[in-house]
Image (cartoon, grey):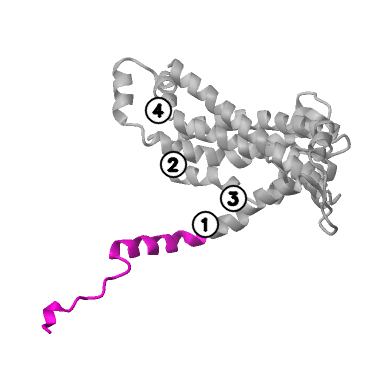
Amino acid sequence: MKESSVKKPKKLLTQSKKDHISAYLYISPFFLLFAVFGVFPILFTAYISFHKWDILGTKEFVGLTNYQWLLTDPLFWKALGNTMSIWVMSTIPQLTLALVLAFVLNQALLKGRHFFRLAVFLPNITSVVAVAIVFDAIFGQHYGIINYLLSLVGVEPINWKASVLGTHVAISTMVIWRWVGYNSIIYLAALQSIPKDLYEAATIDGANKIQQFLFVTIPMIRPMIIFTVILSTIGGMQIFAEPQTFSGMGGGAVNQGLTLTLYLYEEAFLRNSFGYASAIAWLLFLIIVLFSLLNLFVTRKIKSAD
């Protein structure tokens, strides 16, 4: 038999298929971790929300009872109202200040731009507990700097922790202080992608800085504004650490600092009502999805109107 007539064994996998398999193996750890720590808790929470469970005993199937109780629970609606109020009071000023700050940081005439860009981001990496302690002192009734400044114009000291509006203002201020710099950096990256030609053309047409900001800058970074609005909506609905450290458990004497995530935490880990807490988590998820879709709808309407 001639050597050339001997057939070589056919390979089971081609090199192309081997490359595909190795690529999937490289990225598989992420998907495995995401399935364990992302997908499974979501599905398990949905399953638990239809049960009465204190984590130690057996689960008792109760159907939609948890959701029915939740919709008639005054504390849930109180927490939802507080969350919405703090979200509005913190998100709108936060994004407006971030946009203005990014515009200033993008100016070529600004000295020490790199230092200021680093400085505005520092609050975001500061410990939330440290932030809460500092702001607790700032908004102190007797020795707080806010009440001292107000006393200079004849305003009586305010007990910020005792009133609904005072608590919401203090918590919103903490959120604004932490996240303005973060959003400024995002806007700054978007600003630096705008072609200089547009500003030169606007200058030739006689547009001043304010007109350039309104009619060149904002339309060009609209996708990034939509992104930050949606991101702030998701974060604002899940606010937990600031009200928990400022108002304590229960959100204060009249629950003025009680947010949805704080209420969820208390139901799960203080009252051991994991089924009820899971129902809160799923309603919170639906509210966030609803608001995100509403934001997307409004911004697309504004874009189509242009």
Tell me the residue at 62%/56% (across/down): 37
Q: Is residue 1 visible?
A: yes
Chain part drawn in magenta: 1-30
Tell me the residue at 80%/23% (across/down): 154
Q: Which mark is residue 31?
A: 1
Q: Is residue 143 visible?
A: no
Query: Dot 1 lies on which element?
Result: helix
Based on the picture, tell me whether residue 58 belongs to the magenta stretch: no
Q: Quadrant of the N terminus?
A: bottom left
Q: Earlier in the sequence, mark 3 or mark 2?
A: 2
The answer to whether the residues at label 2 and label 4 have Cβ atoms under 8 Å apart is: no
Q: Which mark is residue 220?
A: 4
Q: Amino acid at mark 1?
A: Phe
Residue annotated with mark 3: 125
Q: Amino acid at mark 2?
A: Arg
Of residues 184 and 73, which is closer to you in this image? 73
Q: Earlier in the sequence, mark 2 or mark 1?
A: 1
